[in-house]
Image (cartoon, rainbow, N blue to C red):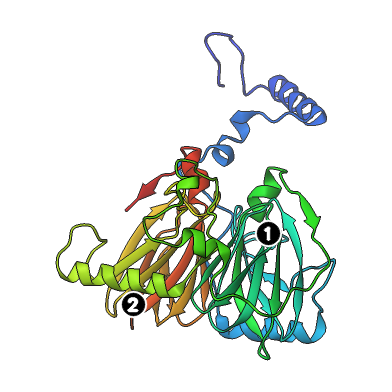
Amino acid sequence: MTVTPATGVDFDSPEHQERLADLYRDFDAVGMTPLWRTREGLMPFSPEPRAVPHLWRWTELHPLAARSADLVPVGRGGERRAIGLGNPGLPGDPYATPTLWAAIQYLAPRENAPEHRHSQSAFRFVLEGEGVWTVVDGDPVAMRRGDLLLTPGWRFHGHQNVSDAPMAWLDGLDIPFVATTDQGFFEFGPERVRDASTPDRSRGERLWAHPGLVPVSAAGQPQPSSPLMAYRWAHTDAALAAQLELADEGHPGVLGPGHAAVRFTNPTSGGDALTTMRTEMHRLRAGVRADRGRTTASSVWQVFDGTGTVVLNGAAHPLSHGDVFVAPSWTEVSLRADTDLDLFTFSDAPIVERLHLLRTAT
C-alpha cells in the first residue's frame, strides 16, 4: 500500500485506480495531457531528435535527377525540378531535418524555371558545371562551379539554362521551419523569358563584392540578409588556401594545422548571409582529422571535392564527390580527409543562436 501522509490516500487501492482512470479519460476528452505522464518525451535530459544521421550518394542522386528531366517538365505549378532529400527518421516529410530542406535541382538544356517568390529563404550551391543563370529581383547572376547563390525570403527569382548541357546543384531552404511556424507565403512572378546573355558580374557584385568596402550610401544601414547574391568560388578558394598557409606559419587566428573554414556573411552587418541558415566552406588537408563534437544546431554537408570519411554517432561513412550527409541536433560528428577534402555545409545555427538555445559539447 502506498499512502501519502499529507492526504492519507491509498494510491494502490482499486477505488483510487478507477478514479484515476476516469480522470485520464476526461483529460483525453477535452484535449488535456498531464506533464507527469509525458515529461521524458517533452523535456528529455538531452536532445532526442527524430531525424537521424544519414548519407546520400551523389552517384545515386544525380542519375535519378537526370531521369526526372525526361519525364517531368519545368513550368507553372511545380515550378522547379527540385527533389528533396527525405530523412529516414522523418517519414512522410521531404525534410533533411525539422528545420532544413535540402534538394537536388536539375535544369535541362535551354530550360527556363519561371520566376516566383516565397517567404522561405533559399540558396544554391553549384557542385559542377556552368551555363545557368538566376535572376534575383531583376538582377541576372551567373551560376558556376563552386559558387554560392542566395535568394533571401520574398525575392523574385527564376533560373534559365542557356547552354546545351544540363546542370544540377544543391538547394537549401528553411521550408520545414517556416512550415512549422505557419509563416509560408508564395507568389507567382511575371511571365517572361529574359535575354540569354548574362553579365560576368551582377549588379549586386559590382556594388557589394569588394572586401572590407561598403557603399557610403548604405553604411550603417544593416540589412537582414546579404544584398550580395553571389559568392564566387575564386574568392572562397583563395581564402581557404590563405588560411592553410597561415596555419603553416603558426598564426593563432586560424582553426589549426590542415583545417581551414570560411563563413559566408552579410557585408552590411557581418552576420550570417541569410537570416535562418548559416553557410560555410571547409577544407581539410589529406590525413587531417577534425572532431567537431556535438551541437544542437542541425547541419547538412556536401562534398565539393576530394575523399574522406565522416563518423556520425560512431558510424563511419566513406565520402566522395557530391555526397550529401545530414547531422541532426546533438549528433557527434568527426571528419577525416583521405585526400585534400572540400566540404560545403549549411545549418540552422542562426535560429537556435537567436533563441539562446545553442549548446555544444566536445
x then y, percent, for residue 43: 53, 37
Instruction: Give the structural element (helix, strand or loop) at label 2.
Output: strand
In the rendered image, the vertical position of residue 353 relative to residue 60, given as above or below: above
Residue 283 falls in which quadrant of the image?
bottom left
Residue found at x 69% / y 31%: 33
x then y, percent, for residue 140: 64, 69
Kindly identify which residue carries mark 1: 137
| Residue 307 seen in the current view | yes
Counting the numbered discs, the total is 2
- At label 2, counting other C-alpha atoms closer than 10 Å, the crowd grade (few under 14, some 14-19, many 20 or more) is many
State the residue in front, 356 or 88: 356
x then y, percent, for residue 357: 47, 40
In the rendered image, the vertical position of residue 239 relative to residue 48, given as above or below: below
Residue 77 falls in which quadrant of the image?
bottom right
Kindly identify which residue carries mark 2: 337
Label whose residue precedes the other's in the sequence (1 or 2) = 1
Which quadrant is the N terminus positioned in? top right
Name the kind of residue labelled 2 in the image.
Ala
Name the kind of residue labelled 1 in the image.
Asp
Looking at this rendering, what residue extends furthest in the left direction? 250
Residue found at x 84% / y 68%: 76
Dot 1 and dot 2 residues touching (CB under 8 Å): no
- Cα–Cα span, label 1 and label 2: 40 Å
Residue 81 left/right relative to 174? right
Looking at this rendering, what residue extends furthest in the front direction? 217
State the residue in front, 44 or 342: 342
Residue 247 left/right relative to 306? left
In the rendered image, the vertical position of residue 183 relative to residue 202, given as above or below: above
Residue 46 left/right relative to 20? left
In the rendered image, the vertical position of residue 345 relative to residue 153, given as above or below: below
Instruction: Give the structural element (helix, strand or loop) at label 1.
Output: loop
Q: Residue 39 shows which numbered tag?
A: none
